[in-house]
Image (cartoon, grey):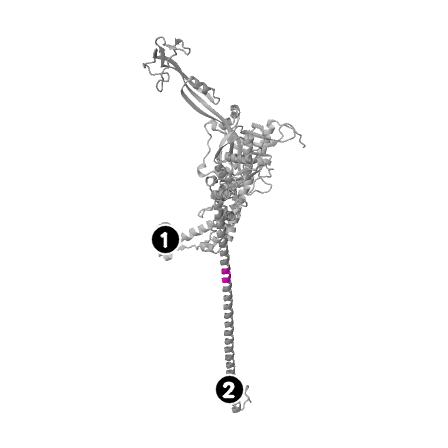
Amino acid sequence: MMLAPKRMTEEDLVSTVNSGFENSLGQPGGQIGDDRAKAWNYYLSKPLGNEEEGQSKVVTADVSEVVDSIMPNLLRLFTTADNLVSFDATSKEDVKAAAQESDYVNYVFFKQNAAFVILYTWFMDALIQKNGVVKAVWEDYESVTQERYHDLDDETFKVLKADEELELVEHEEETRTHMVPTPVPTGPAPIMPTMNGQAGPGPMPMVPPGPAGNPMGPPPGAPGPMGVAIVPMPVKVKYHTATFNRRAYGGRVCVYNVPVDEYRISNDSRDIDPCSARLVGQERDITRCELLEMGFSMKLVKSLSAGGEAKNDTAEKRAREDKYEETNETMPLDWSQEKVRVKEGYIKVDYDGDGYAELRQVMTSGSTLLMNETCDRQPFHVLCPTPLPHKHFGRSIAEKVMDVQEVSTTLLRQVLTNLYHTNNPGHAVWEQGIGEDTMDDLLDVRIGRVARFARPVSEAYSPMTVPFTAGATFPMLEYFDKVKRDRTGVHSDSEGLSPDALKNIQQSVMGQAMDLSRMKIEAIARIFAETGLKTLFLHIHELILKHQDKKAVVELRNEWVEVDPREWRTRKDMTVQIGLGIGTREQNMLHLSAIKEMQGEIVEKGGMNLLVTPQNIYRTAAEFVKNANLKNPELYFTDPGDKPAPPPNDEQAKLQAQAQQLQQRQQELDAEKAKNNQDKIELQAQMAALDAKQQQTQMLIDHQQQMSKLSVEHQRVENDLIVSMEKIRTQLTELELKYATDVPGSAV
């Protein structure tokens, strides 16, 4: 059936969104949800389900050991850098603006949000449950504080009432009568000469100032100037008592962790970045009060059914529950706290029928449409420690170790079970040899127990001894521990070796092993940096640029600066700065020490302002401070900028010349010493060769003497043999002649 573009109705849109959620990845009851539930059970070392009564039920914690070992490294890498991200400048004139935008975006994330908790939860979800998800949105807020004022005069009350941020809530007006000292003339004014010399009425005499609290004049009864009397006069004054509500409006970027069991994405997604997905969203329970606070009408909220149509009891939810949480959830008695199942989806759909799909933010509850608006982008950002090509969900670190934990658990259970039976053997008894109390006595495990038998013990009882055979299991446990280390890079610093064994290992070999392990963890950090973290900070920059319409004064790099996002430009390129681990920091300190020595040698030889500048030296010192895990180099060194070093004066030039002469003389002495050492080594070699030659000559002489002795001894033995043979022959000849019989060997 061929489809044609057409405008969608609200019912069509709700059906499309609900269908997309039902067929999305991460839906309750799917394979991904079951895998995440299993991984969470393994992290919590929950029973495997194959336990047997009377056998060991211990569960090893391989998954939690690996995850808990990686987490501190990741948190250190992403929280020790001065700026986690920095935007790349597009031109030379854009360098300062890009630097300020980088500082402000980092400030928004780390200061205006619970950054550490967000990163911790985000990383933990990714390491255990395939993907970790956060959501970044701009939220407008209205804060209301109540202020109450007493005894305000008319002018002050009018000023407060005209304030746009203040809303008058209560007002009381009271008129009070005060006796105010007032000057009153008592007779004609004295005649005083005028400026033109003619007589005329004099000016009104000045009233002397009164004491503090009575600026109108002296206290009642005080004598006034000539012709004036100070008389208390009643004056009516209005006073206001008012209560105002001060309403402050603003907005900020908010970053929230999204539970992975609420996250949904279309099954055709082929990238870890959800921006390319056809549908991405969140399915969660929201209270009716929260819906009202989000701006939905009371009539609409009342029409929604509680609980929604989705399943609440999923494998992931059960895996997250601890024993103290395993209670029957009761319905709230307060209507405002009743929960409604809401689907918030960001879907690419041709709603207006023009043939082009636009991204729309759609919220539904059951078959009711709550929101339908066009939007610029979706707000979710995803991390995965091991992304798989052309897939949205990759592999978690837990999945690499779960089979190892299962095998290790089985082996350790066998070891402990064998040990239990060895330490607590069974009892073989002869029924006719036991008494009424024998079985109770044998089941008593107290030290020094007494067992009573009806027959001799040798006839009635024999322990069922079980040999300890689990010793052969320990090599297998070590093997699988090595498998775990090879897969994840997590192991102890000593690799399980004794100090004596470590002495025989070359430092380079140990360094290579540590580097390989560290590289696996740093690879995870780099994947996090280039995927979810990078898109998150670009999104934060985009939200600030779009919504913040007024200046902000914040403290950046120990200085209070004014930031106006209205002057920013759209950024697409950024660099994520990963912090330094302990091993990397120590290596950098060694390299920096070598650089510092080289810079010092260049300066001593007159290379200042040629090969080395004050700015180079400052940067070396600043890197020392950063690698010492101190974030503010400005507290220890002053940046000289691009200023060259001042030329040395005559005294300094003389000292430098003397230092160069001393250094040259030292080099000559070192060369002579090296030559003398070489001559000494050659002489020792010649002496050794001569001694070897003498030893060889002596050995040859000894050999010749020994051969001579052996030759003489051989000749003597041969002569003795000839004589003996002649004697035997003579005896045989005598026998032959005596008995006239042929005797073999005789001389006849």
Considering only vertical position in the picture, is 169 above or below 636? above
With 433 as the anchor, is 684 left or right in this view?
A: right
User: How far separated are the C-alphas under marks 2 and 1?
Assistant: 92 Å
Image x and y of residue 356, in percent: 64, 31
Indicate whether 742 appears above or below 632: below
Q: Where is residue 225 in the image (x, y as percent from the top left)?
A: 34, 13
Mark sitting on residue 95: none
Magenta stretch containing residue 525, yes or no?
no
User: Majority secondary structure of the magenta segment?
Assistant: helix
Q: Find disc 2 in the rendering and name its residue.
A: 727
Amino acid bearing label 1: Ile
At numbered mark 1, what does the secondary structure look like: helix, strand or loop? Answer: loop
Q: Nearer the viewer, residue 414 or 41?
A: 41
Which quadrant of the rendered structure holds the C terminus? bottom right
Taking the spot 49% from the left edge, 60% from the top edge, the residue there is 676
Q: Which mark is residue 434?
A: 1
Neighbour tally class for label 2: few under 14, some 14-19, many 20 plus, Cα within 10 Å: few
Residue lying farthest right? 2
Q: What stretch is highlighted in magenta?
A: 675-681
Drawn side of residue 223 relative to residue 356, left or right = left
Q: Where is residue 730 in the image (x, y as percent from the top left)?
A: 52, 88
Q: Nearer the viewer, residue 503 or 384?
A: 503
